[in-house]
Amino acid sequence: AQSVTQLGSHVSVSEGALVLLRCNYSSSVPPYLFWYVQYPNQGLQLLLKYTSAATLVKGINGFEAEFKKSETSFHLTKPSAHMSDAAEYFCAVSAGGTSYGKLTFGQGTILTVHP
Amino acid sequence: NAGVTQTPKFRVLKTGQSMTLLCAQDMNHEYMYWYRQDPGMGLRLIHYSVGEGTTAKGEVPDGYNVSRLKKQNFLLGLESAAPSQTSVYFCASSDSTLAKNIQYFGAGTRLSVL
């Protein structure tokens, strides 16, 4: 079984400040990990994914995430927040084998960016 | 380049009514998924399909049925809607059995059951 926990349902930062969104996972097999972003009234789009290659993964819009097996974490960061980053962010995990690509999502974190 | 298209975008039902949500993808993907999104709960998998003519239950299948008669379409049915089914429904598709492959999402259907 696999699960995802996102710490903090709401995160608020000032424009230009560091963004840190936390994600911890549980998986009985080596996981594939994803961050998706959802802008208001839109579907989800992929920010980045970890698939057992480099542990530091770079995504779109300046976001990156680091896979830390010892901490079972996959936190999302961005050095300098922009107003356009305001959205809801979801961490998700997928197991290998016969999981048919099924994703288990975290609860989501709403990011607010203040001027 | 349409990707994943969901219809309708909004719908209001009365308790006990039925309806079908349509998902269409133009990427020739084998795998398709239906999720529901509720505040504070992320997305939960309702049903999924690994190919034309096949469907399987996800995490929260009760009260829903699905069909995949054509590869590009995945239908989600509510036979007798309940207020607990008020939610935002998302369809997604993926092109491989590999877990590392990306799911592509539609824009969602907002359903209210009164």
Image (cartoon, coloured by chain):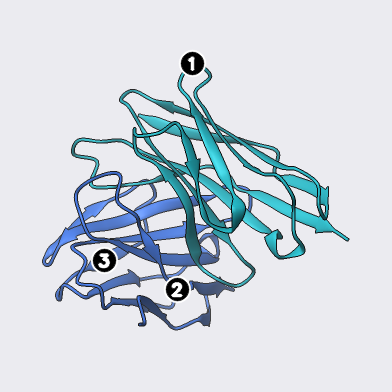
Chain colours: A cyan, B blue
Amino acid type, label 1? Ser
Residue A29, x across and y down, in percent: 30, 25
Residue B61, x across and y down, in percent: 34, 53
Q: Quadrant of the N terminus of chain B?
A: bottom left
Label 1: element kind: loop
- On screen, residue B101 versus residue A61, left or right, reads left
Q: CA distance from mark 1 to mark 2?
A: 50 Å
For residue A70, the mark is 1
Instruction: Residue under label 3, please give it.
Output: B66
Marks 1 and 2 belong to one chain: no
Q: Residue at x 19, y 72 (%)?
A: B28
Q: Nearer the viewer, mark 3 or mark 1?
A: 1
Considering depth in this image, is B89 or A113 the residue closer to the camera? A113
Q: CA distance from mark 3 to mark 1?
A: 40 Å
Amino acid type, label 3? Val
Q: Quadrant of residue A42?
A: bottom right
Cβ–Cβ below 8 Å for labels 3 and 1?
A: no
Residue B87, x across and y down, in percent: 54, 64
- Looking at this view, name the residue that lies furthest to the left: B53
Q: Is residue B18 above or below residue A100?
A: below
For residue B26, the mark is none
Amino acid type, label 2? Gly
Q: Is residue B2 above or below residue B41?
A: below
Q: CA distance from mark 2 to mark 3?
A: 18 Å
* Residue density around tag 1, few if under 14, some if 14–19, many if 20 or more, within 10 Å: few
Q: Nearer the viewer, mark 1 or mark 2?
A: 1
Q: Quadrant of residue B75?
A: bottom left
- Looking at this view, name the residue that lies furthest to the right: A115
Q: Nearer the viewer, mark 2 or mark 3?
A: 3
Q: Residue at x 42, y 45 (%)?
A: A49
